[in-house]
Amino acid sequence: MSATVSPETSLPPAARTLAVCRAAARFCGLRGWAPVTEMPLPNGRRADILALLPDGGFVVVEVKSCARDYLSDGKWPDYRDYCDRLYFAVDLDFPQELIPEEVGLLVADGPDAVLVREAPAHPLAPARRRALLHRYAVTAAGRLAALQDPVGLAEMRAALRVE
């Protein structure tokens, strides 16, 4: 008798991370949330996904590809200061009992993700929300501009380095 192996298990860790991140971003988009991946935060950390909610709130989704990835990374509490809700996104093979009860949980299954546990709310202070919204907008607009005019972006970056 042969064991069944999910397609995600056979992927290398970087590919698993990318697959979970895409499924989590799709989850966000289907709910009207506006996700930005690899979002730099003011504390020097980088959120895997920072999503702007329709009500102006923010969600951070921390993606984990495997138990070792989760156990070797203790930075996730640092994300709480920059979101109203914090989630982990994992794949079907991830041992879900590792994820703390005080965060939400999304589980990726192929290109989609499902909500397994809602994240408790911890509202941001208004001043922090304004500053984060500005950072979010500048980052998202810069990435859009780079997609629309990559040569212009490269020239602008080169000019800024000269000054």
Image (cartoon, helix red, strand yellow):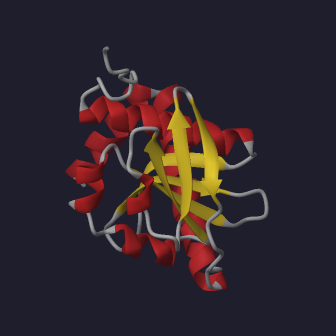
The single residue placed furthest to the top in the displayed view is 1
Residue depicted at 61% across the width and 66% down the height: 119
Q: Residue furthest right?
A: 55
When the figure is inspected, residue 7 is found, relative to residue 93, above or below; the finding is: above
Residue 8 left/right relative to 23: left
Describe residue 25's horizontal placement relative to residue 17 as left or right: right
Which image quarter holds the C terminus? Answer: bottom left
Q: Residue at x 55, y 69 (%)?
A: 132
Residue 45: tell me if it is visible: yes
On screen, residue 49 above or below 122: above
The one nearer the camera, 40 or 124, is 124
Give coordinates of residue 35: x percent, y percent. 58, 47
Quarter of the picture containing the N terminus is top left
Vertical relation: 117 (above or below) 132: above
Say which residue appears at 69% left-offset and 67% top-offset: 57
User: 7 and 131: which one is in front?
Assistant: 7
